[in-house]
Image (spheres, rainbow, N blue to C red):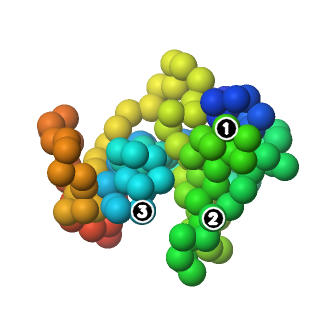
Amino acid sequence: MMRTGQCLCGSVRLKINGEVGPVIACHCSQCRRQTGLYFASADVQRADLTIEGEAFISWYHASDKAARGFCNRCGSALFWAAVGSPKISVMAGLFDQPSGLLMDHHIYCRDKGDFYVIADGLPQYDTYPQQA
């Protein structure tokens, strides 16, 4: 199944021709600070991802283990990428509708903001579970 998406201004456009993992909500302090709430993303194989407008992507290396990609024109959060991984996490909100994606679980819930409640009934983990 081909899925498409884009950033807020349309400078970065995505095509994914392959499997898209379930949506995972990350509530860690870095994701919360980057997005203002939590980072909802789905993993895809980098080989299945085609990007138009790569010149508009800037990368912030939040740690020595991962980088966060964003549109340098409109500021949209786009990606979370572990160094050396064949997968990349794509922000779920970028996908054109209907996306067909479903939220699966929440991670790093112990770091979530104190101004909201997770009440969707999905599994919640304090860290990143090995089985997820």
Q: Which mark is residue 30?
A: 3
Could you say which quadrant of the image residue 40 lies in?
top left
* Structural crowding at the residue carrying mark 1, measured as other residues with C-alpha within 10 Å and reported as few (<14), some (14–19) or many (≥20): some
Residue 57 sits above or below residue 82 on the image:
above
Tell me the residue that label 2 is attached to: 60
Residue type (three-letter) at the residue carrying disc 1: Cys
Tell me the residue that label 1 is attached to: 74
Mark-to-mark CA distance, 3 and 1: 20 Å
At x 24%, y 52%, the residue is: 113
Residue type (three-letter) at the residue carrying disc 3: Gln
Side of 51 where 75 appears, left or right: left
Disc on the earlier residue, 2 or 3: 3
At x 77%, y 34%, the residue is: 11
Q: Residue furthest top?
A: 98
At x 55%, y 53%, the residue is: 89
Looking at the picture, how far across and down is residue 72, in whole percent? 72, 47
**Discs 3/1, front:** 1
The answer to whether the residue labelled 2 contacts the one labelled 3, judged by CB atoms less than 8 Å apart, is no
Disc on the earlier residue, 2 or 1: 2
Judging from the image, what secondary structure is the residue with disc 2 in? strand
Q: Residue 40: tell me if it is visible.
A: yes
The answer to whether the residue labelled 2 contacts the one labelled 1, judged by CB atoms less than 8 Å apart, is no
Could you say which quadrant of the image residue 118 lies in?
top left
Could you say which quadrant of the image residue 68 lies in?
bottom right
Side of 69 where 104 appears, left or right: left
Residue 117 sits above or below residue 129 on the image:
above
